Image: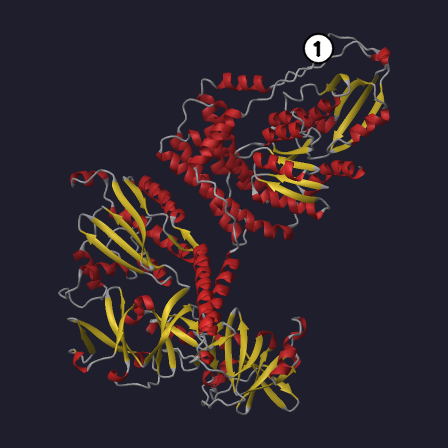
């Protein structure tokens, strides 16, 4: 399954990438902020996007909405922190497919994303 | 997540990124302090704290994470509630304290240790600050209520008439989420939201999943119960539920129509999303104020070193081809034309690679802002730092070595140089002391000057101390001012009567001098009593590849940096004189220069001993010129400076060594060292 | 002779245990743990460096790397002997310090088990090299003096010289 990882911290992106690639996911791109995410989504057309919420220049919610406008079938999983309940709610309302709470552990991420993997593989 | 083996490569990146963020944060805070308002930076500080919290949590560094969290909360509150009376000065201190704590922990982690610091005191202060803010803010309750109302959804569900005729089946389900998936209430909301696309009359328990975050706990314990009506079959619904993220288990069954009661109609209302544009605008402004976003990539330093070495070897190899003895006497016009082209390209490659290693001094200089600020506050003095020429670039290696010396010199300037405000006013000086940190490139060197307009150095005190320590015999010796001042660079030298927390123990200046020397630089002191002190540091710009003149002394070959050579000539007898100690000197254009016979100095078997039969190379370092006596000049060559192996400790007079075109080794002379 | 040594050196770390490279100075044969030996080269031109202890001959260019060389005879305070075509430089890497050891001749690689090595007796004749010997290895009828690598490169003398300068 092809993923686009969006987070402003290189460290988080790398951690997530390592976790995912180890388990059979293919990370085809990375973005450090919302606007980059939109560009990369358009260019790479990933199966799934993991989107951090707090980012400079353009945050995750705005990017999510833009991506959903471009491609209503886009699957975007938000990466949030505890305490961001209302923002996550807004994301869900705007079309996010789900969310994962930081700090995340490998097992958790895999379980969360597994639903999507089955879905794409079934296609 | 305790797979420690996979953490190691992450550690480097964590350390690098965290340090970068801390630096950014510090700069942000100090800049905004100067321009009078932390307000524009709130958003960015919040973001940095948020990221620090996240990264630290990923690495399981819980103290760092919780400290960052406590500050994140403060800045979140500042951003959302926009309280009126905020003590920004106190806030700045809190942030800087946090920065210091995290810096300390990162250092521990970097050297393989554990971040075992206890952040509770620092975090406690942050939390206290936030509570105080919340208490004293008159707008508080309104703001929080307002924000609650705005962000609060008015999700109310009701039950409408059951219309079995429309073919809708009523279902009930109880859903359990995975342990520790987090924010169960929002997950429940997600379910409701998705369900509402094809189901109606949705009722659920807990009811207030959006307003009350504590419902997460309830959902964890008792599961999320939901009832709804839809046309879809059980299979389709089961499929739907199975696709839920972090679903652990669920039970579902059809509900008998009769058991449903009729209640009032309500509609599901979801509020509009909060407009983000305003937030984005301010963020953008702050971004532009901070460092311009140029595209940089971070490169592993060892790769850079390898590249440097390779370029160095290319230079040697190129010389071995174009200056090959086998080509002697041959007429090869086309060859030499191509060789010149090759030389040109190699030269350009070399310049480019060198420039990659060059880093502007600005980051180092700006670190000094923090030091001045802290010291000024601790010592209750008034001083400000002026930075000039921060764009001047030096080799990356050098940056690391001069950072500590500079810090010490700046501390000295504030501690000993700048007088308390009253004294300054009494002397007719401006109340606020000025410390000027300046860098500029001069020829092949970089000059760094630290100048203060404080009290200056007292020559008599220094002389007396020097006498005390046996550095001079009697006080009557005629020493130049600069020689007197340079006594302060001796170990253990301090004319201070009292020892402060920062200096006065006399263990500083000599270490500074040593560190400067280690990178091949020199340091000199000048002062005006009552007017201030100026410390000047001169560092050779690039150590790695220099233009050198190869000379022969007996069976050995030495290389003299071209930049140090003033002229070379064959001696005429009449210019040679001897001084009172029988030292040989040469008179040139009215000036006397000592002669140094290199074969003697280096204990080499001399081939040429008669001064008239060899060559004199006049070299100069620090204004002093001496004449080196060598057998013959072998020619100019670009040489790659290689350090002497560490097993052989540094020898005065020898800067390093280089590989010659024929595979031999030549020692590169350090003219300043020969002078002493 | 160098060829044999080179082959031995290619063996992995575990199998290097109990293996020693032996070399001779006059009539005495010394052994050094092979794990420290990186290569063996013939004698080449040494660039002298002034003001160093007598046994530090200077530096050589080893394929672009500058390494210092020590004359082991002089290190052990024996009589200096002119170099000839049997003289070799044994390049060792001990605790990240690379040094070349100038020896009269290199012998062979031997396996000397722990049980065949005894502690050196406390001589009273004050043979200087005993300072550097950590054991005596018995191989057939011969004895090989096993070197203490740390001591070999300890530069206390260089330190004291530094301070004088």
Q: Give coordinates of residue B219: x percent, y percent.
A: 71, 26
Taking the image as shown, residue C7 lies to the left or right of residue B618, namely right
Relative height, residue B551 to residue B195 (above, below): below
Which quadrant of the figure contains the N terminus of chain B? Answer: top right
- Please tell me which residue is depicted at 49% across the width and 71% down the height of the picture: B317
Taking the image as shown, residue B99 lies to the left or right of residue C3, namely left
Closest to the observer: B339 or B377? B339
Q: Is residue B544 visible?
A: yes
Relative height, residue A20 to residue C6 (above, below): above
Location of mark 1 (residue): B266
Which quadrant of the figure contains the C terminus of chain B? Answer: bottom left
Q: Secondary structure at mark 1?
A: loop
Name of the residue lying farthest toward the left:
B476
- Please tell me which residue is depicted at 42% across the width and 29% down the height of the picture: B39
Q: Is residue B61 visible?
A: no
Choose top left, top right, bottom left or bottom right for residue A123: top right
Q: Residues within 10 Å of mark 1 (few under 14, many from 20)?
A: few
Q: Give coordinates of residue B339: x percent, y percent.
A: 46, 69
Q: Chain of mark 1?
A: B
Choose top left, top right, bottom left or bottom right for residue B198: top right
Choose top left, top right, bottom left or bottom right for residue B610: bottom left
Closest to the observer: B353 or B97? B353
Taking the image as shown, residue B490 lies to the left or right of residue C12, namely left
Q: How many marks?
A: 1
Relative height, residue A24 to residue B172 (above, below): below
Q: Give coordinates of residue B307: x percent, y percent.
A: 51, 61
């Amino acid at each position: 399954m092809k993923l686009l990882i969006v987070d402003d911290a290189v460290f988080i992106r790398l951690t997530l990438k390592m976790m995912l690639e180890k388990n059979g996911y293919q990370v085809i791109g990375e973005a450090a902020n919302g606007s980059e995410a939109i560009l990369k989504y358009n260019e790479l057309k990933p199966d799934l996007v993991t989107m951090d919420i707090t980012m400079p220049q353009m945050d995750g919610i705005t990017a999510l909405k833009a991506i959903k406008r471009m491609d209503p079938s886009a699957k975007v999983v938000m990466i949030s922190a505890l305490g961001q309940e209302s923002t996550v709610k807004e994301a869900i309302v705007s079309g996010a497919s789900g969310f994962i709470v930081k700090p995340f552990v490998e097992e958790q991420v895999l379980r969360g994303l597994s639903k999507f993997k089955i879905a794409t593989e079934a296609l | 997540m305790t797979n420690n083996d996979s953490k190691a490569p992450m550690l480097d990146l964590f350390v690098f990124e965290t340090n970068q963020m801390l630096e950014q944060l510090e700069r942000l805070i100090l800049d905004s302090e100067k321009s009078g308002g932390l307000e524009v930076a709130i958003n960015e500080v919040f973001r940095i704290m948020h990221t620090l919290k996240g990264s630290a949590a990923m690495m399981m560094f819980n103290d760092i994470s919780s400290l960052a969290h406590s500050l994140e909360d403060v800045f979140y509150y500042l951003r959302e509630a926009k309280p009126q009376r905020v003590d920004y000065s106190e806030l700045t201190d809190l942030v800087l304290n946090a920065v210091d704590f995290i810096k300390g922990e990162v250092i521990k982690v970097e050297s393989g240790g554990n971040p075992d610091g206890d952040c509770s005191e620092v975090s406690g202060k942050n939390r206290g600050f936030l509570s105080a803010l919340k208490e004293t803010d008159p707008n508080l309750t309104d703001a929080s209520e307002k924000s609650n109302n705005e962000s609060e959804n008015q999700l109310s569900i009701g039950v409408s008439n059951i219309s079995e005729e429309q073919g809708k089946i009523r279902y009930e389900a109880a859903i359990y989420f995975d342990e520790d998936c987090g924010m169960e209430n929002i997950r429940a909301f997600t379910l409701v939201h998705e369900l509402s696309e094809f189901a109606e009359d949705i009722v659920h328990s807990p009811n207030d999943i959006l307003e009350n975050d504590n419902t997460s706990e309830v959902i964890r314990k008792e599961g999320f119960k939901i009832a709804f009506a839809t046309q879809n079959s059980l299979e389709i619904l089961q499929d739907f539920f199975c696709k839920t993220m972090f679903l652990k288990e669920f039970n579902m069954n059809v509900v008998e129509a009769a058991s449903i009661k009729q209640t009032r109609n309500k509609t599901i209302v979801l509020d509009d999303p909060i407009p983000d544009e305003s937030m984005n605008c301010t963020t953008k402004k702050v971004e532009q104020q901070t460092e311009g976003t140029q595209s940089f990539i971070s490169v592993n330093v060892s790769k850079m070193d390898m590249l440097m070495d390779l370029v160095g070897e290319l230079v040697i190899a190129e010389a071995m081809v174009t200056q090959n003895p086998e080509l002697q006497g041959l007429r090869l016009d086309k060859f030499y034309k191509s060789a010149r082209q090759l030389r040109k390209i190699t030269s350009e490659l070399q310049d480019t690679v060198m420039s990659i290693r060059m880093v502007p001094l600005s980051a180092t200089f700006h670190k000094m802002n923090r030091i001045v600020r802290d010291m000024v506050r601790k010592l209750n003095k008034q001083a400000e730092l002026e930075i000039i020429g921060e764009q001047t670039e030096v080799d990356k290696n050098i940056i690391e070595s001069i950072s500590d010396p500079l810090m010490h010199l700046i501390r000295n300037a504030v501690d000993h140089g700048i007088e308390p405000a009253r004294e300054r006013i009494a002397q007719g000086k401006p109340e606020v002391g000025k410390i000027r940190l300046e860098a500029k490139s001069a020829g092949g060197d970089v000059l760094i000057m630290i100048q203060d307009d404080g009290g200056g150095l007292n020559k008599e005190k220094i002389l007396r101390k020097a006498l005390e320590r046996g550095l001079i015999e009697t006080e009557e010796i005629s020493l130049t001012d600069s020689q007197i001042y340079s006594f302060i660079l001796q170990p253990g030298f301090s004319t201070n009567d009292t020892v402060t927390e920062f200096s006065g123990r006399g263990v500083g200046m000599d270490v500074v001098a040593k560190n400067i020397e280690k990178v091949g630089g020199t340091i000199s002191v000048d002062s005006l009593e009552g007017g201030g002190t100026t410390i000047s540091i001169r560092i050779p710009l690039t150590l790695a590849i220099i233009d050198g003149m190869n000379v022969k002394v007996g069976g050995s070959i030495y290389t003299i940096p071209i930049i140090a050579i003033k002229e070379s000539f064959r001696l005429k007898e009449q210019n040679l004189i001897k001084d009172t100690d029988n030292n040989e000197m040469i008179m040139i254009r009215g000036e006397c220069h000592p002669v140094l016979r290199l074969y003697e100095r280096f204990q080499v078997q001399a081939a040429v001993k008669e001064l008239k039969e060899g060559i004199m190379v006049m070299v100069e370092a620090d204004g002093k010129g001496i004449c080196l006596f060598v057998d013959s000049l072998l020619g100019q060559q670009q040489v790659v400076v290689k350090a002497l192996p560490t097993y052989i400790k540094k020898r005065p007079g020898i800067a390093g060594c280089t590989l010659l075109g024929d595979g031999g080794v030549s020692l590169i002379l350090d003219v300043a060292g020969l002078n002493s | 002779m160098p060829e044999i040594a080179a082959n031995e050196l290619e063996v992995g770390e575990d199998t290097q245990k109990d293996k020693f490279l032996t070399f001779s100075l006059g009539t005495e044969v010394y052994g050094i743990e092979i794990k420290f030996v990186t290569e063996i080269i013939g004698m080449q031109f040494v660039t002298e460096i002034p003001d160093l202890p007598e046994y530090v001959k200077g530096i050589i260019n080893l394929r672009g790397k500058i390494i210092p060389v020590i004359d082991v005879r002089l290190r052990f305070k024996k009589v200096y002997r002119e170099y000839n075509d049997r003289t070799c430089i044994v390049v060792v890497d001990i605790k990240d310090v690379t040094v070349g050891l100038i020896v009269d001749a290199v012998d062979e690689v031997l396996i000397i088990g722990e049980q065949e090595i005894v502690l050196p007796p406390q001589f009273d004749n004050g043979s200087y090299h005993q300072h550097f010997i950590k054991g005596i290895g018995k191989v057939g009828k011969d004895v090989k003096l096993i070197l203490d690598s740390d001591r070999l490169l300890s530069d206390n003398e260089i330190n004291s010289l530094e301070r004088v300068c």
